[in-house]
Amino acid sequence: MPFGRRSAWREVGLGVFVRRYRDLDLNVGLIVGDGAAMLVDTRSTHPEAAELIREVAELTDLRPSVVVNTHAHFDHCFGNAVMLPCEIWGHEACAADLRSRGEEIRESAARWLTGAAARDVATVEIVPPDHLVRDHRAIHVGGRLVELRHLGRGHTDGDLVAIVPDARVVFAGDLVEQGAPPSFGDAYPLDWPATVRLLAPFASGAVVPGHGDVVDRAFIERQAAELAAVAATARAAHEQGMPEDEAARLVRLPREEAAIAVRRAYAQLGGAI
Ligand SMILES: [Zn+2]
């Protein structure tokens, strides 16, 4: 791979690292404590997760003993099996989703992945989190506090953020997206803006989105405003009885994502989700 295109760890807070992958522009987090390390998300396939473990060894002799999944999408949790016997933390709805529609999520992966990963995803053993969070849970990783918080529905109904207060780092999962529009396929567009606004007070330093470049509080406040505009447009259009395709043309998102956002917003307004 040409120089500059290889992924590498970046320290975004003391002992807190991010690795940004070319595939899907995905971010994975690593928190290194005294005698223990924790991963935030596990990539899409078993070989990718095994590679991640080798990459962790570039930084520390510790093998991660704790994993948190930010949500149930394949790129964030399909490497879980390789991490066992780790503790795997996630939101209750994330675990339920992986149990009830894991195969559907696997099928969605086939649409996104290319090359070896597209093949390897077929044989992933889907392992849901076994340490579950409803609202908030504080855990300790090698003496460091990590707060796991569910701030409401947004990108999915089971988004969990991981906050490392001593390093002022927030791992936001796909609640925050840099470099691409927010992804609405499993989203709750009417709730999403408020959820991101609740995240803002925790963002005193680096904010690591699920995909793209590391951002900050100002970025997430802008994203909350953009998400609020999507929700308001969809709500007004629904009130007027406007058809979905017409409403989608009013939403400031790329065409395909706008259609999905309006479909999900209308489903919320109609009480279907
Ligand atoms: Zn996602």
Image (tube, grey):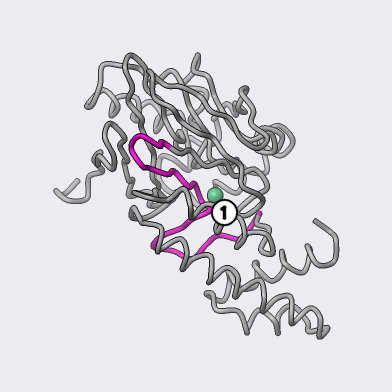
Residue 132 is one of the magenta-drawn residues = no
Span highlighted in magenta in the image: 164-186
Q: Is residue 130 above or below residue 214?
A: above
Residue shown at the point (65%, 49%) measured from the top left: 152
Image quarter of residue 8: top left
Residue shown at the point (79%, 64%) measured from the top left: 267
Q: Position of residue 164 (x, y in %)?
A: 41, 36
Seen in the image, is 131 located left or right of residue 76? right
**Could you say whether the residue bearing mark 1 is in a helix, strand or loop?**
helix
Q: Nearer the viewer, residue 197 or 84?
A: 197
Q: Nearer the viewer, residue 102 or 170?
A: 170
Residue shown at the point (34%, 25%) measured from the top left: 53
Residue shown at the point (71%, 64%) measured from the top left: 264
Q: Quadrant of the C terminus?
A: bottom right
Q: Position of residue 46 (x, y in %)?
A: 45, 28
Label 1 neighbour load within 10 Å: few <14, some 14-19, many 20+? some
Q: Is residue 259 above or below residue 65?
A: below
How many marks overall?
A: 1
Q: Quadrant of the N terminus?
A: top left
Amino acid beneath label 1? Leu
Q: Which residue is mark 1?
A: 198
Image quarter of residue 236: bottom right
